[in-house]
Amino acid sequence: MGLVLTLDSMADRYKMLPSQVLMHATTFDLYILDAARSFYNYHERKAQGQVAEDYTVSELQAIMDNAKGQP
């Protein structure tokens, strides 16, 4: 199902038929689509207040220490 939705998304974005996408798209095109959609979705969630704020360096260090089992 994921491939079908990806083909549909690419076809819609680039105004092509899904069969044209299958014939002409490369893995680079898939990479760009994935990056663009992720970026778009992130900003949509951020605008709706659904994205946590960035961690500070000390918070990230505490998370890493906890994962390693250090106090």
Image (cartoon, grey):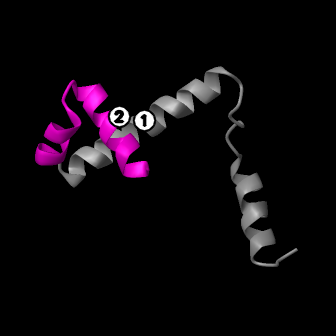
Q: Secondary structure at mark 1?
A: helix
Viewed as shown, does residue 4 lie left or right of 39? left
Q: In which quadrant of the rendered view does residue 51 lie?
A: top right
The secondary structure making up most of the magenta span is: helix
Give the magenta range: 1-25
Residue 29's x, y, as percent?
23, 44
Badges 2 and 1: C-beta atoms under 8 Å apart? yes
Q: Which residue corresponds to the image point at 62% horizontal and 29% vertical from the top-left? A: 45
Say if the magenta span includes residue 15.
yes
User: How far apart are labels 2 and 1 at the CA level?
Assistant: 10 Å
Above or below — where is 13 with respect to 63?
Answer: above
Q: Residues within 10 Å of mark 1 (few under 14, many from 20)?
A: few
| Residue ID for mark 1 | 37
Q: Secondary structure at mark 2?
A: helix
Say if the magenta span includes residue 23.
yes
Q: In which quadrant of the rendered view does residue 35 lie?
A: top left
Q: Which residue corresponds to the image point at 71% horizontal and 25% vertical from the top-left? A: 49
